[in-house]
Image (cartoon, rainbow, N blue to C red):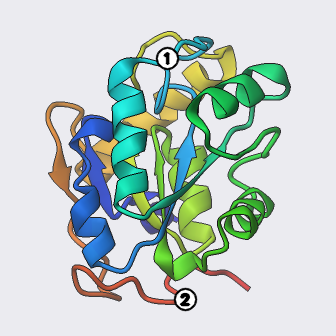
Amino acid sequence: MLDLLRPDQYFRSLYDVDFDQLVEMGIRGIILDLDNTLVAWGDDSISEELMSKVDHLRRLGLKMCIVSNNLGGRVAAISRKLGIPAASGALKPFRRAYAKALEILGTESRETALIGDQLFTDILGGNLAGLYTILVDPISSREFATTKLFRLLESVARVRLGLAREGWRSVPRRASGQPGVVPENRHKME
């Protein structure tokens, strides 16, 4: 179970991820978590830095999709502002959410990365779906009440996985693959 919580990479923020390297690895699509990955929880403002990053990803030829457990208008509003399609009410970590995103992106799991701030929703779900997973630290400590409870469990898992919150680092690959290779069925459960 612990291996399903292990991201392929871990960075302080979205802005530290080496997207050029992801493209070189064959990644063509990026699934992005919304709250505390792209914007602070409950916030709907888009920073110039975020718009610039989204433009950079487009120039690299990466397709993007926001996947959020949130319902309603806020997700759609941010999606419109960024010009990125979104799947709201996703029920992460269930694979259905990621299957919808892959359909929107037109990519396969082995050529798609997921970036999110939570081990038990984003990373677990992405790993179960066979995606290349990237964990980032949350933008803000302000969060939904249930998320705060999961953060307590997550802090224990982070210690066991060797994922300190200070700084960033690449996480050693699982035994099933080499760096830069995304095995096709590495996490899929029957």
What secondary structure is marked by label 1? loop
Residue at mark 1: 40
- Residue 6 location (% of width, % of height): 39, 60
> Residue 164 falls in which quadrant of the image?
top left
Q: Report whether residue 63 is seen.
A: yes
The image shows residue 62, relative to residue 90, as above or below, that is: below
**159 or 58, nearer to the observer:** 58
- Residue 69 location (% of width, % of height): 74, 36
Residue at mark 2: 185
Depth-wise, is mark 2 or mark 1 nearer the camera? 1
Mark 1 surroundings within 10 Å by alpha-carbon count, few (fewer than 14), some (14 through 19), many (20 or more)? some
Which kind of residue does numbered mark 2 sit on?
A: Asn
The image shows residue 20, relative to residue 138, as above or below, that is: below
Mark 2 surroundings within 10 Å by alpha-carbon count, few (fewer than 14), some (14 through 19), many (20 or more)? some
- Residue 71 location (% of width, % of height): 83, 28
The quarter in which the C terminus is drawn is bottom right
Q: In the image, is 125 to the left or to the right of 49? A: right
**3 or 98, nearer to the observer:** 98
Query: Residue, x 70% and y 60% (percent of image)?
Result: 101
What secondary structure is marked by label 2? loop
> Residue 165 falls in which quadrant of the image?
top left
Which kind of residue does numbered mark 1 sit on?
A: Ala
Query: Residue, x 32% and y 25% (percent of image)?
Result: 49
Residue 145 badge: none
